[in-house]
Structure formats: structure tokens, C-alpha cells
Image (cartoon, coloured by chain):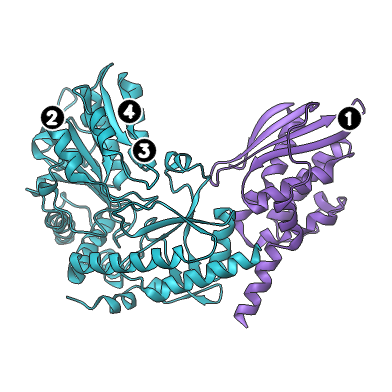
Chain colours: A cyan, B purple
Amino acid sequence: MADIAHCRSDFPALQQDVNGHPLVFLDSAASSQQPAAVIDAVARYQREDHANVHRGVHTLSHRATELYEGARDKLCHLVNAASRSEIILTSGTTESINLVAQSYCRPLLGPGDQILISWLEHHSNIVPWQLVCEQTGADLIVAPINDRGEIELDKMQALMTDRVKLLGVGHVSNALGTVNPLRDIITSAKKLGITVLVDGAQGVPHMNVDVQALGCDFYAFSGHKMFGPTGTGVLWGREKLLEEMPPYKGGGDMILEVSFENTVFNELPYKFEAGTPNIAGTIGFGAAVDYLQSVGMQNISEHEQALHRYMVAKLAAVDGVRLIGTAREQASVQSFMLNDIHPHDLGTLLDHQGVAVRTGHHCAMPVMQRFGLPGTTRASLALYNNTDDIDRLIAALEKARQVFA
Amino acid sequence: MNNLNNNDELQDLYRDLILDHAHNPRNFGRPDEATHTAEGINPLCGDKLHLYLTIDSDNRIAAAAFEGSGCAISMASASLLTETVKNLPVADADACFVAVTKRLTIRSSDSAAIANVDFKELRALDGVRRYPSRVKCATLAWHALHAAIQHPQSTATTE
């Protein structure tokens, strides 16, 4: 196991000054920085190994294919999928969810059917369902959350009926950091035979994820929130379901045989991967998995939990800070307000002091409406953050308050 | 030294005049007699405001008011706008829209479009020039002004 305190030096972007101050990066929930190992893996491929995958018989095409498919194997092991056929490589969580909406739900749903989500969801776990509901006449229904930002489990369970054909729920809320009680939710849904998709964009980077143990049917996540390049992601799905689903996009690589009369689709996972994929990004994604595992998911999880507790305690002690999202189980994220300072003003004031945070609605506008806010300021953690970062955030908040006094 | 520079820059953006207008916006509220209104929306930030103009028979802005919510920059800019355009002929007010948006989005201030406008207190907005992500906050109300003049009831966005 690597000493987590030394990980920070693995990230070139963190070794810079911003606005005259050493950068404090507290926006990893939006997109995390990349370690040199990922940047180098992508560069090495671009310099030495680039060719199209699954096509050529020449050496470079063979190398590119090995690297690309090697990344799939790493991702398969990371989330403990039963088989590499279940790992569909996508451009990210958003595409993964759209794939399920269009390929799984669209043929299945009709008027009177329902898709159930929670009030905590990110736009990418709302809008794809709205689109498929419009296309099929099904309804989108939403389980409420309480004032702490937790799903009201009993109310969600009450909404689970035989009309619900799919339940979509986040693993960890990107806006409030709430860790959802997936075990309870999935157990209840499965009793009624409801198919469950978990949006794991904020889960996989921060904790051990075992899709088989979770018992869900689909699990979606993104590379760029776990130290990989943008434009990479995974849809994990149960092989049986994936087999039954029609292709999502048509094109090369997803076929076995094409004539103008008929096309025989390729086997899993290629059936869902039309066209030349994001080869370089996926190779980087594989390197990011290696990096995460070299540090150790348990190690990362413990470090972030301890740092999160430190951050919440420090923030709560700042005069004028109101914490938004106080779930009993939280991970890596804390939203807050400082007096009546608008989050965008606060974001600018913090940026001036070299502290990068996210401000606004965090692509989760219903959550903000639930709390009657235009947005919040959000600090989010990754394995490279430390208590100095939190102390700098607190000092910057004190100064911001003075400017607006 | 860097810290000092930084503070100067911060105070350049959040000048006392800006903070004063943000905390105590002038002409805030919905008047009964408005003849032209526009909604301004900045979808990225969630800033939203309504601008109300009362244009008299001489095509002069007899009154301007606004209501809405947003960051200090957008609120202060809207407040300053209402004070600036009051009693101006409509054409002059529209020229202000062009001048302010140009002034905040171009580096040089010698453009012909802005030569004839007396910016007075509007100079307080100049601090946003250094912040590309905040320019839209400052120009939102001005886009709404332009929209209201063009169409008595309309919606303007910064996108």
C-alpha cells in the first residue's frame, strides 16, 4: 500500500500556484485531477501504439487492442463484474444511463408504467428517463428526501409497485454527499422484481464497489471522476439483460455481418460499442484503475472519511456557515452557504485565494429547489487532499466574509 | 506581495459601490405602470431578473425598476442600470446596452460604440473584465434592457 500522504505529488496539476497561492483543489466531484501515471499512459499510447482496435492484423493494431481490452479487464475486476462481457465502455455515466433508457426501457415501457427515481438525482439520472417517458407514455415518479438530504426510504418503498419498471438511484449524491442506503433500496425493489440502475459516478472513486454484492441490475460510472480522462465511462449490466437489449447505436464494430437486407449484431460487450471508441481515454482509464488499486480503495475510503469529518467540523465552526446536506452517512462532499453571499460571489472570492470549489446548482436543480436555494458552494475531496487544504478553505472563507461584511 | 495584489484585485471587483448596490438595490420591485418588461435569465448561474420600463409618449424612459435574485455582480449591475437609463430617450438607453456590453467584453475602451457614453458610476463594473466567467452576471440586466426595448414583453438570456 502506498502512503496516501505522498499521493499528492503524483498529480502534476496540483503542483502549481493559482492567483499567487498554491492551488487547493476541492472540486474533484466535478472532475478529478489525473496522476502522472494516467497522463503518461495516454501519451505513450499516442506516441507508440496508436492504431484502430479490433481491426488490423498489424502490430500496432494488436497493441492498441491489447491495451484497450486490458482496460476493460481492469474495470471488470474493479467492480467485481461476473464477466468482461458485462463491461460496456461508454463516454461516461450520462451515456451509460441514456443507453439503459433507450435500449432497455424504451422497448419495455408503455402508458401506465413508471420509472422511479429520488429527489437527490443529478440531471443525468433525471433527463434520460424523462425523454423515454415522453417517448413511451410512461411516468417518472420521484421519492422525496428529508431536511438532512436523505432519501425517505419508507416513502420510496411505498412508491414501489408493479407499475414501476425501473428504479434509478445514485450511489452518492453529487450535490449533498449523501450515501444512499442501496442495500435496503435494492432489496425492496427486487422483492417486486423492479430492475435497478445505480448511478455510481460519485461512488466508485471513493469506496469499494462490488456490483454482484449490491444486487442491482445496472451500474454506471465515469472515468474522469476517478483520475481518468474525460469521455470515458462504463455501463455494467447483468449479462442476461444486456443480451436481451437491442443495440443502442449502429455502426462499425458492433456487427458480425452486414448486408443491405440484414445485419447480425456482434456479441457482448461489442454490440453496444459502435464506431471507433475512445481508445486513448480508455487506456488512461485503465491506468487510473491501476493507480486507485495501488493506493487501495480501503485506504482511500478511510482517508477521505477522516478528512470529511475534519472538513465538516471546521466548516460548521465558521461564523455564518450553514451546512446544506447533513446526512448521517456522507462521502467526500459538503455543500454550504456563507451568510447571504451568493455562491458565485463566494466562488470568485475563494478562487482569488487559490481555492477551487464548485458553485451553483451542481447539475441537480431539484435538490437546490428542495432547499430553497439558487445553488450552494460545494467542497469535494479526493485522495490527494489533506487537512492543510481544509485549513486554507476555512481561512479563505473568513476573508471572503470580511470582503462582504 | 502576491497577497497584496490579490486583495487589490478583489476590491477592484467588489468595489464599495458594487456591494452597496448589491445589498441595497435601487428601484427594486414591480411597478404597476410599466409599459415594457423583460425577463433576464442566466441559465448557467441561475440568475433571474425582471426588468420593468415605463416609456412615455416622447419615447423617453420615465421609470425603470427590477426584481429578481442573483449574485452581487448581477444585482448591482441591474440596480445601476435602473439609475442610468431613467430619463434617457429609448435610443440612448439602447446605446448604453451596446456600450456596456462592449466595454465589459473588449480589452480596449476606445471603440467608437462606447465613445459617446458617459459611464460615470458604471465604471464600477469594470472589475469583471478580468473574470470571463462573471461577465455574463454583469451584462444580464443590460440584455434584458435591450430585449424590453425591442419587444415590450420578452425574455433575454446570456447564452
Measured as percent of width and height from the top left, residue A176 is found at 38, 51
Q: Which mark is residue A193?
A: 2
Measured as percent of width and height from the top left, residue B29 is found at 73, 37
Badges 2 and 3: C-beta atoms under 8 Å apart? no
Q: Residue at x 23, y 46 (%)?
A: A181
- The kind of residue on which mark 4 rests is Ile
Task: Give the residue pinned by disc 1.
Answer: B59
How far is the residue under mark 4 from the one under mark 3? 10 Å
Badges 4 and 2: C-beta atoms under 8 Å apart? no
Q: Residue at x 19, y 64 (%)?
A: A297
Task: Give the residue pinned by disc 3.
Answer: A119
Quadrant of image for the N terminus of chain A: bottom left
Closer-to-camera residue (A21/A328): A328
Closer-to-camera residue (B72/A132): B72
B81 relative to A74, above or below: above
- Please state the chain letter of the residue tagged with numbered disc 3 in the rendered image: A
- The kind of residue on which mark 2 rests is Gly
Element type where label 1 sits in the image: loop
- Please state the chain letter of the residue tagged with numbered disc 4 in the rendered image: A
A394 relative to A219, above or below: below
